[in-house]
Image (cartoon, coloured by chain):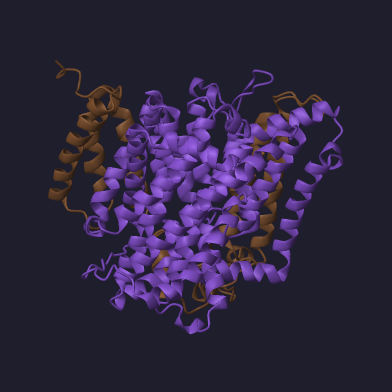
């Protein structure tokens, strides 16, 4: 019963006063930014990265992880009460959640979202604990060829599962890979693409890209639209569920949890995809699909469970393979490297306290979130009444200070402005920025492993297909691409992203 | 192909959601109405008729520009061989790939139908990024307090609901908060006051 021994280690770490405090801070902040539309976990975590320098690594990671899954809880509140996704993964919750609120069942919707999230969070914690060690074992057998192929698979999966045009998404990845190469080449010491600027010799700051492309660009685009927010704040009551509601919602919670847990593990997966997939599934198997869009409780229970499960299991590829499956996990890589922890299979053996502590903290964090979100719902409703015109200057300010304090240098502030322009262009051209960030993180890793693999094989490129593990990873990537290109699947994929 | 017009009747909920936050997918703005406007009917001029999917076209141009620049710059770096790759190998390969993808997008834009680019206003872009730029320019010289006041006061004007009294109050409150929380609370190394005022 290694699992329990390990979890015990984890809880002994996570239950220290400091770590409980940081888990609480994380989920509180996560709920806050989840509730507020227009700021998501990516800019928030990016903003807080520099501050985590000073913390012990476990506490830092516990807090940052809390922000991510906390945002999944908070996002649903806004979706249900305001009909706006407080967090992008709660887009689907808007559909039926808001309709429930209009019918006076806001309390039921909020309660079922919180319960679903908690069930999913608990299950996903167990999944992470059970699946991470065997996966890490496999990962230890990986050579450079396997790592390269795995990254190809991860990047392709990110593209396939993302919404929008396939070619554009691949282009964004390649662009990200290129941006990742800026700076000093580790092998030759040569400065690449740095244009003689000393600040670029360490590469472009990840935070500058993330904040420019996600934070600033989003604020600018929000300001271009004259959307007035209408807050649905009539009395939120009836947080206790009726037996009938529970009976209807429980199977959906179960399905959403399973779906989210498995989709989260996939590279490129995570909260958003899981929520979409779950809504589509619930609608498909419902006895009366016409209820969907009119306040079907399954349409809230399923996606809300799925997004939380997906958010948590997306830690698996990061912790076992060292490969971030989405933008938030890419930031977690940043957080780990700040504390000179190389993400990968060795984390579990070299840093068991950190690994199991982080996992145990997820469950504790989920418990706190239920308490934060149900009895304190009134507080979050108040927060929703803060108008955007007051919110965004504050967000801008915190971003500026966060970026500045990375290296106590205004250079990064200017870089963020530059990437703000680029990000804004991407929005206009409908190029999704998430794959770019993933490519940016993986760029140097990919080049390094490609070089090493070909060095070992004396330049023979068949090494990628002659080693069985590497070949099967590449085959999986190719298969994924072929599947998405099939006309039938393609149509389905669009449907899922369009109307879900 | 890739950009089918989405189902015409869409729910209020998700449409508003798209407009405000979710700009990833080509759904909300690629409505059949837009496609109709774009359809070449003999009046549209040569290039309007040629580029039928402006977003794809310009995305392609952007990719080609970035990829081409990467290739040209990487010409200065040693290429090496596959077994002993020089620093120029990977960038050149990526640059070529990006150019190819860009070319594909450009070609596709002659065939696919898509919504036109929309630039309702440039005001938020200029004001938001301008005020951040200003923050960067002044923070080291005039200190955190002045930089915060300038950033908040200037950036608030980008909203169409701008109210000056409110933004003055917000600016002062944020300046106090920032100094207390970041300067003293977290101990960030930032000059707080303009040099003349610092004791």
Question: x, y percentage for residue A256?
Answer: 52, 64
The residue drawn where x is 35% and y is 52% is: A369
Chain displayed in brown = B
Is A14 in front, or is A281?
Answer: A14
Is residue A36 among what the camera can see?
A: no
The residue drawn where x is 31% and y is 74% is: A105
**Looking at the image, is A496 positioned above or below residue A126?**
below
Chain displayed in purple = A
**Looking at the image, is B111 positioned above or below residue A40?**
below
The residue drawn where x is 35% and y is 71% is: A98
Judged left or right of residue A388, residue A484 is right
Q: Quadrant of residue A223?
A: bottom left
Judged left or right of residue A13, residue B168 is left
Question: x, y percentage for residue A125?
Answer: 51, 49
Question: x, y percentage for residue A272?
Answer: 50, 57
Question: x, y percentage for residue A366?
Answer: 40, 50
């Amino acid at each position: 019963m290694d699992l329990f021994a390990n979890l015990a280690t984890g809880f002994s770490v996570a239950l220290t006063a400091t770590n409980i405090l940081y888990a609480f801070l994380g989920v509180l902040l996560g709920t806050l930014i989840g509730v507020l539309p227009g700021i998501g976990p990516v800019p928030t975590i990016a903003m807080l990265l520099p501050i985590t320098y000073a913390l012990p690594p476990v506490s830092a990671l516990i807090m940052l992880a809390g922000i991510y899954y906390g945002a999944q809880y908070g996002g649903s509140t806004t979706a249900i009460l305001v009909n706006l996704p407080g967090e992008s993964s709660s887009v689907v919750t808007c559909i039926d959640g808001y309709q429930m609120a209009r019918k006076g069942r806001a309390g039921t919707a909020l309660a079922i979202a919180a319960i679903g999230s908690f069930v999913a969070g608990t299950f996903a914690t167990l999944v992470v604990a059970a699946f991470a060690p065997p996966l890490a074992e496999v990962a230890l057998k990986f050579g450079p060829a396997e790592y390269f192929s795995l990254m190809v698979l991860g990047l392709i999966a990110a593209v396939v599962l993302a919404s929008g045009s396939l070619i554009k998404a691949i282009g964004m990845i390649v662009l990200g890979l290129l941006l990742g190469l800026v700076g000093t080449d580790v092998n030759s010491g040569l400065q690449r693409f740095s244009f003689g600027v000393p600040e670029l010799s360490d590469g472009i700051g990840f935070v500058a890209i993330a904040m420019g492309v996600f934070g600033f660009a989003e604020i600018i685009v929000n300001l271009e639209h004259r959307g007035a927010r209408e807050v649905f704040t009539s009395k939120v009551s009836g947080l206790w569920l009726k037996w009938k509601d529970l009976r209807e919602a429980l199977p959906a919670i179960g399905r959403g949890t399973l779906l989210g847990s498995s989709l989260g593990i996939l590279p490129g997966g995570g909260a958003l995809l899981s929520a979409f997939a779950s809504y589509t599934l619930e609608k498909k198997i419902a006895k009366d699909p016409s209820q969907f869009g009119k306040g079907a409780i399954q349409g809230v229970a399923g996606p809300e469970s799925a997004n939380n499960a997906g958010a948590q299991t997306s830690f698996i590829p990061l912790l076992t393979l060292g490969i971030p499956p989405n933008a938030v996990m890419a930031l977690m890589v940043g957080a780990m490297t700040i504390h000179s922890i190389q993400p990968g299979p060795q984390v579990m053996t070299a840093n068991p306290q950190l690994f199991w502590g982080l996992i145990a903290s997820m469950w504790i964090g989920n418990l706190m979130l239920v308490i934060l979100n149900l009895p304190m719902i009134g507080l979050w409703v108040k927060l929703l009444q803060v108008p955007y015109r007051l919110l965004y200057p504050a967000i801008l300010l915190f971003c500026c200070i966060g970026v500045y304090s990375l290296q106590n240098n205004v250079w990064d502030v200017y870089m963020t402005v530059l990437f703000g322009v680029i990000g804004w262009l991407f929005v206009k051209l409908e190029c999704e920025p998430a794959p770019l960030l993933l490519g940016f993180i993986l760029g140097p890793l990919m080049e390094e492993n490609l070089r090493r693999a070909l060095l070992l094989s004396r330049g023979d490129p068949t090494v990628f297909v002659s080693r069985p593990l590497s070949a099967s990873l590449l085959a999986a990537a190719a298969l994924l691409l072929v599947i998405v290109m099939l006309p039938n699947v393609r149509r389905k994929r669009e449907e899922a992203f369009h109307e879900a | 192909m890739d950009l089918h017009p989405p189902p015409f009747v869409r729910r209020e909920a998700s449409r508003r959601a798209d407009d405000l936050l979710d700009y990833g997918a080509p759904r909300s703005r690629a409505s059949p109405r837009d496609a109709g406007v774009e359809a070449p009917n003999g009046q549209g001029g040569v290039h309007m008729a040629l580029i039928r999917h402006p977003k794809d076209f310009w995305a392609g141009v952007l990719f080609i520009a970035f990829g081409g620049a990467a290739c040209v710059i990487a010409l200065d770096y040693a290429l090496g061989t596959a077994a002993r790759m020089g620093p120029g190998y990977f960038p050149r390969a990526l640059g070529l790939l990006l150019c190819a993808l860009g070319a594909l997008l450009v070609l596709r834009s002659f065939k696919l139908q898509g919504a036109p680019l929309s630039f309702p206003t440039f005001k938020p872009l200029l004001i938001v990024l301008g005020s951040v730029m200003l923050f960067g320019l002044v923070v080291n010289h005039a200190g955190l307090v002045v930089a915060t006041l300038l950033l908040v006061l200037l950036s608030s004007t980008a909203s169409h609901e701008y109210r000056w009294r409110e933004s003055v109050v917000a600016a002062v409150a944020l300046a106090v908060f920032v100094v207390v929380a970041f300067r003293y609370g977290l101990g960030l190394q930032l000059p707080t006051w303009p040099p003349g005022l610092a004791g």
